[in-house]
Amino acid sequence: MPIPIHVVGLALAGKTLLSNKKNSRTSLTRKRRISRPRPQPRLMRRQRPSGPNLLQKLMSNISSSITKITQKPTKENYQSIVQGFLPENAKLLTPKYPLGASQIQFADLDGDSQNEMIASYALNNETTTLILKKQNESWNELTRITNNDSNTMHYIGFADIMNEGKKQLLLSSTKSKASPILEIYSLDNAAANKMIDLNYSRFEVLDQSQNGEIRPARLAVWNEAETGEYDIKVLHWNGEELAPAAVPADYYHRNVIPYFAQKAKQTPGNLNHWYNLTKSLINAGAYRDASAAIELGLYINQNSPSKEKLASLKEEIENK
């Protein structure tokens, strides 16, 4: 049976529509596949500073702080500063002791937590110690200490002897081959006041600081008699003056006995070394070792006319 024409037309139209719809979907699908997301409006985009610009800005903000931190302080030419205070033809001196001491030294002598500059010079058979202080970015002279009868510096040192939160100045100047004299000064109101002067053959500064506790320093002073015997005293500040104190046994063990033992070993034929060694052993309470030192010293020096001096220490040991 033949199909009516209008029905055929509708079918063809439907097929066409379906075909167009399919092609349309395919076209849309292709478009969606190849389409790219649209950029957001500029107002919606977040502005981020670029790396170099950000770093430059940060460095600009902190450059002054970095400069202050990294800038090194100007190093002062202390030698030139001291030379500006010396008289013409004066010669800067290097102390013989302590070993390794320099011509220019620093210490807080007035207790203000700021170091003074100390240097000594020789001129016309005199030694002068110059004390300078930095005030308002410039160095000024506080005082000078002159010794009219010396031309060399034997010792320059510092120690808190009076326990006042500052250090005292220890000076020793002498002429060649003369016995040195130790002078101790306290700096008060920009003036150097002499506390004491001491004859010595040897001396040591004993620091009593223990477990973080600061105590006044003491001085161990050795004096050699013409007979070769040594007298050893320890001096401490009693509030008014430097006065003798008991010599602690550990000082003999640590400092005195090794010194005289080395002397006796180097020159065993010198009876004085055995005497001083025995005496220091007695003072340290080492009586058995003292008796042995007497026997050995007498054996080595049995022909010495002064051996009785060493033998006399036997009685002292018995009495101990």
Image: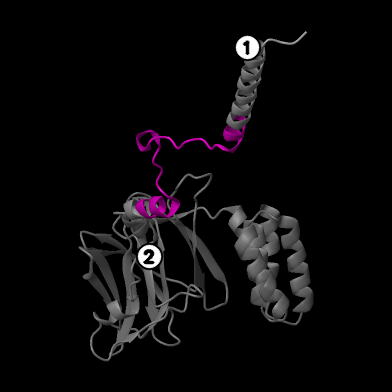
Up the image or down, 257 lies above or below 299; here it is above
Label at residue 224: none
Asked which quadrant contains residue 300, the reply is bottom right
Q: CA distance from mark 1 to mark 2?
A: 105 Å
What element does badge 2 sit on?
A: loop
| Range of magenta residues | 29-57
Which residue is the site of mark 1? 6
Which residue: 29% across, 88% down?
90
- Estimate the x, y position of residue 109 in percent, counting from the top left: 32, 60
Task: For marks 1 and 2, give the one nearer the viewer.
Answer: 1
Sequence-wise first label, 1 or 2? 1
Image quadrant where one finds the N terminus: top right
Q: How many marks?
A: 2
Residue 56 magenta-highlighted: yes
Up the image or down, 4 lies above or below 225; here it is above
Inspect this view and state whether residue 128 appears: no
Q: Relative to the observer, which residue lies in front, 253 or 2?
A: 2
The amino acid marked with disc number 1 is His
Asked which quadrant contains residue 129, the reply is bottom left
Name the side, left or right, on which 84 lies relative to 312: left
- Estimate the x, y position of residue 314 in percent, counting from the top left: 71, 62
Name the side, left or right, on which 219 lies relative to 186: right
Which residue is the site of mark 2? 72
Asked which quadrant contains residue 235, the reply is bottom left
The amino acid marked with disc number 2 is Lys
Up the image or down, 88 lies above or below 231; here it is below
